[in-house]
Amino acid sequence: MKVHKIINGKMQENCYVLDLGKNQAFVIDPGLGTKDILKTIDSLKLKVIAVLLTHGHFDHIYSAAKFKSLGAKIYITEKDAPKLLDNELNMGFMFEEEVEACLPDGFLVEGKNKIEEAEFEVVFSPGHTSGSCVIIFDNFAFTGDTYFGDGIYGRCDFLDGNIQDMKESLKKLVPYLKGKKVLAGHD
């Protein structure tokens, strides 16, 4: 599996394109840079079959509706799914960004997940949002805004963030992150 990083828009959010082989791809956290993400996917000659969201803030979900319109399935945790439909919950309103609403096609569950032939693990990591998660493929841990590496973790002072939940999540993540390359939501 090859991973391609695209840094998006004014929030400098990291989107990841996972080349699964056979010209198929997953996209993790397609943020504000819709054109750049589509350009990268087109240049790689990939078809996006699924979008996986580490949490529901606008800078991570902004392009999800576009990918859905192109045939990709959208996956998020059940707790953060309402953010796909509400510009206040996803915080787009705070940054004058209107996120096009879209319904998820399925929910990420804690533990093993499988979409088509791709298998991966999800670890729920509430704190930044109540429905944050870490997505693990092979030796890569896509941590969203839960953990940035070097002891730095995401903010917990937004809407449904919770510092106590974050502390518990960080403890829980230690064994999952061991030996993995952390690919965070922002650099």
Image: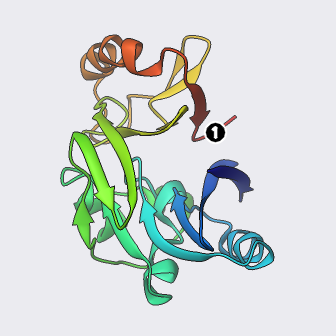
Residue located at (44% from left, 69% from top): 50
Numbered marks: total: 1
Q: Position of residue 175 (x, y in %)?
A: 38, 13
Residue 58 placement, left or right of 81:
right
Badge 1: residue crowd in 10 Å (few <14, some 14–19, many ≥20): some
Task: Check disc 1 and report the residue beneath it.
Answer: 186
Q: Is residue 172 above or below residue 138?
A: above
Badge 1 element? loop
The furthest residue to the right: 43
In the foreground, 113 or 38 = 113
From the viewer's perspective, is residue 76 above or below residue 123? below
Which of the 4 quarters of the picture holds residue 84? bottom left
- Residue at 30% in and 68% down: 86
Query: Looking at the image, is 90 positioned above or below residue 39?
Result: above
In the picture, residue 140 is in which quadrant? top right
Image location of residue 110, percent across then percent down: 21, 40
Look at label 1 and name its amino acid: His
> Can residue 36 be seen by looking at this rendering?
yes
- Residue at 60% over, 35% down: 183
| Horizontal relation, residue 178 to residue 6: left or right | left
Q: Determine which quarter of the picture holds residue 51.
A: bottom left
Instruction: Tell me where residue 180 appears, x and y as whole percent.
Output: 55, 24
Residue 98 showing in the rendered view: no
Quadrant of image for the C terminus: top right
